[in-house]
Image (tube, helix red, strand yellow):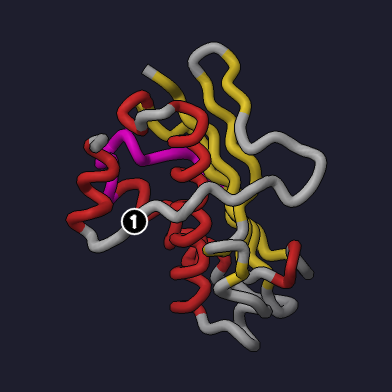
Amino acid sequence: MSRIESKLAELGLTLPAPPPPGGNYLPFRVEGKTLYLPGAIPSREGKVQYAGKVGDDITLEQGYESARLCALNLLACAKLALGDLDRIDHVISVSGYVNCVPGFPDSPKVINGASDLLVALMGDDGRHVRAAVGVAGLPAHSATEVQMIVALK
């Protein structure tokens, strides 16, 4: 078990099965020492767990959990790509999208669900540059979508 998966277990979390692509795209791409991961929505076993607009149907706290589940799905894709999450050196970038009501000011607080998890799992190697953007809609009416780029050892 990788150190990341051991830390997940300590936190009482497990990796979900990697979600299949929802369209004509790859579940990952490795270019040299960089792993590119696609946008992941908050699904588990093919079902969206957090659907709706943050600030209306979804609370800020639920949005945070939604973004955390997106990060877990991305780590599942990384494991599919790498076989061992210990091949990750550090997280480079996270792009987060929040399906929210107009004028919602707290997209960064929602996407912290993904960022906080990555830092909890990897310490300083989980720190990254980031965008957290409010949008009018996301696939399957999901509350969040997160995309990630990581550097490999």
In this rendering, would 51 be left or right of 110?
Answer: right
In this rendering, would 149 be left or right of 14?
Answer: right
Q: Residue at x 43, y 34 (%)?
A: 91
Which region shows up in magenta?
A: 120-130
Q: Residue at x 54, y 12 (%)?
A: 32
Q: Residue at x 74, y 68 (%)?
A: 140
Q: How many marks?
A: 1
In this rendering, would 22 be left or right of 50?
Answer: right
Q: Is residue 86 above or below residue 108?
A: above
Q: Residue at x 61, y 78 (%)?
A: 54
Q: Residue furthest top?
A: 32
Magenta-span inclusion, residue 123: yes
User: Disc 1 marks which residue?
Assistant: 14
> x, y (%) of residue 125?
32, 34
> x, y (%) of residue 87?
36, 24
> x, y (%) of residue 129?
49, 39
Magenta-span inclusion, residue 42: no
> x, y (%) of residue 118?
36, 47
